[in-house]
Amino acid sequence: EEATARLYGPVFASGRAIHVYIGTAARGGRSAFARWHGSQSKWNCAYTLENSTEAGAGIMGVLCAAQDCPREKELVIYMSSQYIIRSFCYWAGDNETRGWTCANGEKLSDAVGWLAQRLAPVRFRWVAANVHPGN
């Protein structure tokens, strides 16, 4: 925990929170992520990645949210991947100490760098995937 807290640093601002939902998918060596901020939001987007895993897509979704959203506003990220949430919230400090030798280390390092530059808090929230009977 200390390594992760040191990595991200203190919080200096907190405006009205921006909420973003990140969904991911992967098949045949390709992956994708989509970011949804709400109906008609200018920040809604989707990207396809070549030679990437679903975890890699999730990390890239977080990276894009950190880059695109104003850094003085709290960012609340909702995703179904407990692995990605733990990668940022619990394991980032240890992974940084080990030189980012973990899976997707380069992507994770880049995303953590952007999150650390934010002035307002970033919160991750887990949401269950495919809970609708039609999914």
Image (tube, grey):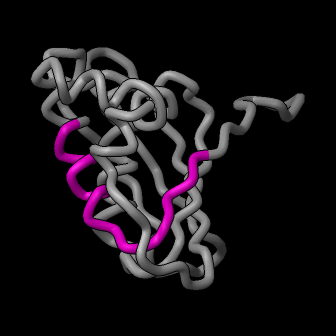
In front: 34, or 108? 108
In front: 3, or 105? 3
Task: Classify the position of the N terminus by image quarter.
Answer: top left
x 39%, y 34%: residue: 2
Residue 4, above or below 117: above
Query: Which stretch did the figure color magenta?
Result: 109-124
In the rendered image, residue 51, in percent from the top left (x then y), is placed at 17, 24
Residue 46, above or below 4: below
Q: Quadrant of residue 71?
A: bottom left
In the rendered image, residue 133, in percent from the top left (x then y), is placed at 89, 29
Asked whether, in this view, residue 118 is left or right of residue 49, the answer is right
Residue 107 shown in magenta: no
Residue 114 shown in magenta: yes
Task: Classify the position of the C terminus by image quarter.
Answer: top right
In the rendered image, residue 122, in percent from the top left (x then y), is placed at 49, 58
In the rendered image, residue 100, in percent from the top left (x then y), is placed at 15, 24
